[in-house]
Image: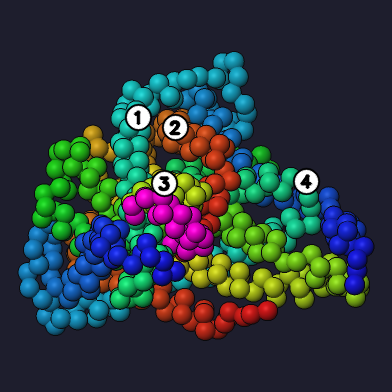
Amino acid sequence: MNSTIYKKKSPLAVFLIPAFLFMAVFLYYPFAMNIYNSFCNITGLGTAAEGFNSPWYLNYGKLFQDPIMNTALVNTMLLMILTIIFQVGIALLLALLIDNIKKGTQFFRTVYFFPIVISATALGLLFNLIFLYDGGMVNQLLMKFGMTDMIDWKDEAHFLFTMMTPVMWQYVGFYFVIIVTGLNNISPDIYEAAEIDGASGFNRVRYISLPLLHNVLITCLILAVTGALKVFDLPWVMMGAGMPMDQSWLTGTYMYNQTFTMGDVDYGSTIAIVIVVIGVVVSQVANRIFKEKDY
Amino acid sequence: MRTADTREPARSHGVRRRVQPGKVLIYLVLSFWAVTTIYPFLWVIMNSFKVKGLIRSDSFSVPMGDSFTFDNYKTAFNRVDIFGAYKNSLIISVAVTVVVVLLAGFAAYGMARYRFRGRNALHSLIIASMMFPVFSTIIPVFRMMFGWHIVNTNSVALSQLSVILPQIAGNLSFAIVVLMGFIRGLPIDLEEAAYLEGYNIYQIFFKVIVPIAKPSFATVAIFTFLWSYNDLFTQMFFLRYKDAFTITRLLNEITSIAGVNYGLMAAAVVLVVVPVLVVYVLLQKNIIKGMTAGAIKG
């Protein structure tokens, strides 16, 4: 790679400086500043910090005493777990099924992936209509099947289902495509060898497909978990400020609310740090537990 | 060993097919999921053409004759500035995409081809920044830009700029990683040949690298564009001035404007979804590739 063209280093500045300057100003500096802010007392987005909090770790103590933060954390964790089970689970099931057919694979791929390109805001409104109390799609459907009482999908008994189902539904196609790509990389020779040894359909999946998908599934798992931390738009559009009764908060929506609506900017910064820390810890733990394997 | 198979590779599929007799069941399950992804959109399109109120009593019927109307769309265009919002969305997303592709292309080329001190450190910085969720940088970015007087203003152009800048930064690291991977895999011979022809380094980049790496650039461009178009969080933070609202941001307001006019809401959803649907149908292969390559970014 040490070609004579690239011996002269001066153009390097032109290539690298613009991009890195951008990232320095809009990513690295703000990231560091956010940590600093979490120790300060800031009452408005546009106002200067009024010195440090006393004690300086005030916000971090607050995290543990704030019942709503607790709700937000529990909901986010729940979302993570459900994402792994349902998003990746359904995607895996669909991918294993489609591996057996030849006609229509492109069609299913296109259709399954479609919700991902749609803005979560539009999906939020769409699901608001679907889960509408008075005459939404689901309630109308249930009436047709003889239900008499309409269900309030956003009440305390149903809000978790209503909030999380669309989030999960949207990204199934994403993991589906990743897993299908993984399946296509498995050489047909291996299946043939198994065929000769008399492995049946189920055993083929259990002993060949799943082990060989190990690394792909780990990637999906980490993406699903970190993705769950970034969810904002759908719950925000559907649930607004923590409906019902501050019960539907997620870490992302709660952070936005603290920063904008409550004007507690330094606490918002602290919640943002919690989001980063959870993301790093969870993906590290997942990596440790399910070490990548070479086959 | 099994020479017969190497001559007829197609048979491997035949062998697999015979093992699974439940093909009908497979198609049923796959179709069921397809229905869950298609039907909600069909449903909302159907209802956006229905007479007021009908959506709540009879939402499954196809709007025909008396029940068919354009009223919801007329209301949508009268009440809110849909075209203006499309225009704002387009300006922001195109600007973000162009700058990201250009700067990331430069940086990826520099990182892939030059050997210099601190290269590994820069590489780690890029990877690390992909892990920063937008939540962790947005407050200081807002405060910084507030100091520059480009947020909370009544200027459409400045409002757009205030969304464009952080969105560019947010997409750069992913774009650099994807492009770097591709450029690194290119044979260097072409660049050397061009160099001998008398091209300078910038000509090599624009006339040799960019044309060969076109698919990767397309992938990055599509991903960046869609991400920018759909990103509500950044837009909620920085777009406070109504005239600068993008279509995504406007849609978020429509609930309060529409109230119980669900037909209007359905029409608004359709108006946002349709441009994306058209682009998706045309470019689906590139999009699927682009979005999954951008997996790490999510």
The foreground one among B221 and A221 is B221
Which residue shows up at 33% across the image and 52% down it? B200
- The circle drawn on residue B207 is 3
Classify A150 as above or below A96.
Answer: above
Which residue in the structure is indicated by mark 4? A103
Classify A150 as above or below A274.
Answer: above
What is the CA distance from the residue labelled 1 to the residue labelled 4? 41 Å
Q: Helix, strand, or loop for circle 1? A: helix
| Quadrant in the picture for residue B1 | bottom right
| Quadrant in the picture for residue B14 | bottom right
Along the horizontal axis of the image, is A14 left or right of A240? left
Tell whether label 1 touches label 2 (CB within 8 Å).
yes
Q: Please, what is the three-letter code of the amino acid marked with disc 1? A: Ile
- On the same chain, marks 1 and 4? The answer is no
First-in-chain label (3 vs 1): 1
Between tags 1 and 4, which lies in front? 4
Residue A292: percent from the left, percent from the top? Answer: 58, 79
The foreground one among B234 and A216 is A216
Which chain hosts label 3?
B
Which residue in the structure is indicated by mark 2? B271
Q: Residues within 10 Å of mark 4 (few under 14, many from 20)?
A: few
Considering the whole magenta stretch, tell me its main secondary structure: helix
Residue A143 appears anywhere in the view: no
Q: Please, what is the three-letter code of the amino acid marked with disc 4? A: Lys
Query: Residue most toward the top?
Result: B65
Classify A120 as above or below A257.
Answer: above
Which residue in the structure is indicated by mark 1? B82
Which residue shows up at 88% across the image and 57% down it? B8
How many badges with numbers are in the image? Answer: 4
Q: Please, what is the three-letter code of the amino acid marked with disc 3? A: Lys
Classify A216 as above or below A115.
Answer: below
